[in-house]
Amino acid sequence: MSGGTSSGAYAPMPQAPTAQAPTGMSADGAAQSAWAPNVFTWVLTWRLLICVEVVVAIVAGLASSDAWLPFAAAAVWTIVSILPALAPPTQPFMRRVVLVVDLTACIALLAIAGDDATLSLLAAYACSSAVSWAAHRPIDAFIAGGACSAAFLAIVAIGEGGVDRPAGITGTLSLFLFFSLATSGFFTVAHRIGALEIATEISRERGRYRRDLHDRLGQALSGMHFEVQAVQAVGRDEHAASRLLSLADGYRDSLRMLKDLFRVGDEPMVGTNVASVIRQEARRMGQQASVQVAVDTTGDASRVPPWMRPHVVAVAGECVNNAVKNGHAGSIEIALDVTDDLLVLSITDDGVGFDNPPGTITEKEGHYGLREMAERARICGGEVVIASQPGFGTRVRLQVPIPIDATEDVLERDASKLRANVWTLLMALRVALGVVAIVELGSNVLTGDGGLGTLLIAAAVLLDVVAVAVLSTPIRRVLQAGAAPAIWYSVGTGIAYGAVLFWNIAPIMLLYAPLVLLGVGVVSGRRGAARASWAMLGVVVASTALMELVGRLSDDELRASLVHVTDIALLGMAAVQGAKLLDRLETLQIRVRYQALARLRHGLSGRMRDQLTERLEELERHARELATDTPDDDEAFAQAAARLTSESTELKQRLRDIVHTLADPTPQQGRTPAHV
């Protein structure tokens, strides 16, 4: 019996996608091919948006007329930056040269900015270089972000009046820090998650082979081995030919089963009743071993989900096989009880038993059956309890919950963890930037620059950040149901922005609040992210316009508002592009996992199936020959039956060696053969 150590639920692999990834593509290669076009679109759209913002600032009088020169330079460089995408360099050195030239150009744009508004907008333009560097190598995002931050600080320090607006400086530096962290973390996750998932899937696939070879083929061969021994023990009589033909048919069925094992594995049992399958298998195994098996079922067994049925049947079969082979039981009782939300399977035998107190699993070295049953129970989300004492038989109790939605999609149970990892990253960044906002608001209160309104906003931000830190998982579940809560949150953020403008409070809360747009993109997709982005952007613009109409904004505050509007637009665009990129990554990772598993299946099945198939074919041929041409001499018949028994033993030996190899593929000196 095989026991595994894999964690999480196992679901059958999807069928081969229609569009295959290139042969031999690695997880890293799949990720690169997935995000390359999206990164180009992301950066290009980003830069075009900033160019438009500069024009708006000039026309609205928020930027000086001298800003036309940096605008023209930014527009020209945006067009020039398209060239590497049209003809991407193939050499790593040349790719690095392109990145360095692009970063140098972005810093040069900062140097020619003639006023604060243009400088802030071009700083947002330079942030796009962090995305390009992170896509090449994630850690390099900090090189680009750090270089831009240093250049920005130097220009502000040298420029006239720059130090009089610490809030604007803090916001821009936070933007550099955020995009360095976010893009580096995102692409790091994208690099790592594919390889990790492939390794996990390969481990699960080995476990699946181990389970199926042991639980399904091993049980069938054990039953036929009993029949071979019975033929040898009884000798030549009037029923010998029929027994031998039954054996030959059994070996033929085992050949068919062997082919199925390498094709479908734990395929969901659709259109079958788990109680009927258990009853039929128990009757068959009982007849083969001449053991009385009683099956009692209560409840509606059709409520058991299709993906759960093969595991329940396998546990029942393994228990009967153990009771017959190891326990030498004379009778076995199986009870299956299915309620609205619970399945309970109990198997009791009157065999010799063994020392296994409840709540423990005691197995001999090289035996995996009990651990395998526990693994199947975990796959189903339940547990198995094995109780036995020498001389008092054995009782196995499998208890698993039945999902409320019994039609649960088996593929959803094995969904990629990419989105969950990116969500965790974004929530960590959101909390970090929220803490920055709280610290700045608190410092304003302590220095006397803020009053009761600042204190209230700081308390609201603190409550918001704590809620995100504590309720990250529930929030994700809410967003999975739809983007409506995020849209209303975005509207509320815009209203709060108008309030802080009215009270003349630095809108530091916009450092972290727009991150909800990225979270919506991760969970709800690009449509949800686009709707939430438009909602937040629209309300922030409306709040800014209203405060301007009532005369609550100075020119500097209006420029800062323009920067905030730009930041929200950039984050909204990043949310949409990031959601599209995640979709492509998940699709390609499925393809790469499928190809890696296909190579594993081909390698394992080629070796294992050839070895087992040859022996099964020989046993079937010899059984049929002995049935159709039965020797008249008892001694000759006994010799032929002994040969069958020897070949059956050899087959079981080969099978247990394969099962042990799957359980522990690392060669070890002095290791004893495993036992099935």
Image (cartoon, grey):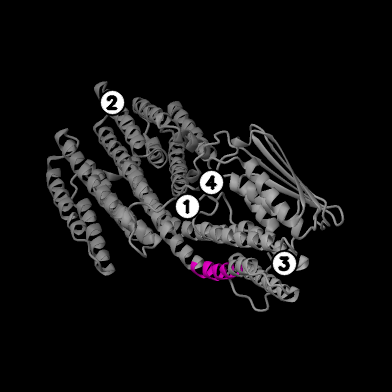
The residue at which mark 3 appears reads as 365
What is the quadrant of the C terminus in the image? bottom right
Give yes or no for residue 268 being in the magenta stretch: no
The residue at which mark 4 appears reads as 268
User: What amino acid type is highlighted by mark number 1?
Assistant: Met
**Above or below 605: residue 340:** above
| Mark nearer the N terminus (3 vs 1) | 1
| Mark nearer the N terminus (4 vs 2) | 4
| Mark nearer the N terminus (2 vs 1) | 1
| Mark nearer the N terminus (4 vs 3) | 4
In x, y percent, where is residue 480? 45, 36
Residues shaded magenta: 606-619
- CA distance separating discs 3 and 2: 72 Å
- Element assignment for label 2: helix
In x, y percent, where is residue 129? 28, 54
Task: Classify mark 2: residues with Cα within 10 Å, few (<14), some (14-19) or many (20+).
Answer: some
Viewer-side residue, 461 vs 642 = 642
Label at residue 13: 1
**Discs 4/3, front:** 4
